[in-house]
């Protein structure tokens, strides 16, 4: 099932409709008690998180589900068609379970991410930020991305670096969700909060 898509706004308009759709979703699947309350809280916190990070936005929010062997996987999906600055990206990625942009997976994804962040930093003029990008994507000092260097960086990843991605904010979303995925594109931000309802 996929609920109606609700348009939400930075002035909190659309929040009540989003919560109504969440209730309709839980009733459809006979989700009750703590599970129903958790889904409602996750919907509200997802909305409030974006409201606290971004200004002057409109977006789309809906819930969808997938039956798995372990139970019903519920997804709260949010799409905002607006580019983010580096501080906003850091705030959103701090909630992601992996701590990473899901768009940056694989070779092509890494190249796209380099281009996207380079375009963003062109207006920021932030050398430290660009250095972090280069470190993350294994960009050489000359400013280009190398597959060979990228492979080397993966093989030399330290345990400390892995642990950094596991340190999530102690928020409602981090505590209640099974997974949080973030896709940062050039002008679109997509967030999916997953909650598994065990059978």
Image (cartoon, helix red, strand yellow):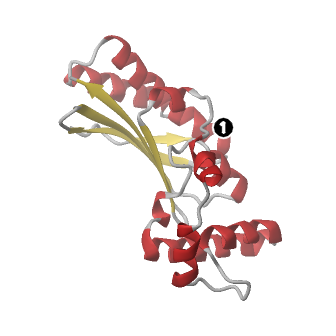
**Which is more toward the observer, 95 or 62?**
95
Residue 28 lies in quadrant: top left
Going 49% across and 65% down the picture, which residue do you hit? 104
Going 64% across and 58% down the picture, which residue do you hit? 84
Please say whether residue 106 is visible from this viewpoint: yes
Residue 142 lies in quadrant: bottom right
**Which is more toward the observer, 154 or 81?**
154
Going 31% across and 34% down the picture, which residue do you hit? 74
Residue reaching furthest to the bottom: 142
Q: Can you say whether 30 is above or below 182 in the image?
A: above
**Quadrant that contains the C terminus:** top left
Q: In this view, does 155 lie to the left or right of 35?
A: right
Going 81% across and 71% down the picture, which residue do you hit? 127
Q: Residues within 10 Å of mark 1 (few under 14, many from 20)?
A: few
Residue topped by disc 1: 52
Q: Where is residue 151 in the image (x, y as percent from the top left)?
A: 51, 75
**Quadrant that contains the N terminus:** top left
**Which is more toward the observer, 22 or 13?**
22
């Amino acid at each position: 099932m996929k609920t109606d898509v609700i348009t939400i706004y930075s002035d909190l308009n659309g929040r009540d409709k989003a919560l109504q759709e969440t209730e309709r979703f839980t009733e459809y699947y006979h989700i009750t008690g703590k599970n129903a309350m958790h889904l409602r809280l996750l919907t509200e916190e997802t909305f409030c998180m974006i409201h606290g990070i971004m200004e002057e936005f409109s977006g789309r929010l809906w819930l969808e589900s997938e039956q798995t062997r372990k139970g019903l996987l519920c997804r709260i999906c949010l799409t905002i068609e607006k580019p983010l600055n580096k501080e906003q990206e850091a705030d959103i990625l701090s909630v992601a379970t992996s701590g990473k942009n899901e768009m940056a997976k694989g070779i092509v994804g890494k190249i796209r991410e380099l281009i996207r962040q380079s375009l963003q930093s062109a207006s920021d003029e932030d050398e430290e930020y660009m250095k972090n990008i280069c470190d993350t994507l294994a960009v050489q000092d000359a400013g280009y991305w190398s597959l060979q260097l990228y492979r080397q960086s993966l093989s030399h990843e330290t345990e400390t670096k892995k642990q950094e991605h596991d340190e999530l904010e102690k928020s409602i979303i981090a505590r209640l969700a099974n997974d949080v995925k973030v896709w940062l594109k050039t002008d679109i931000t997509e967030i999916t909060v997953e909650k598994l309802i065990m059978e």
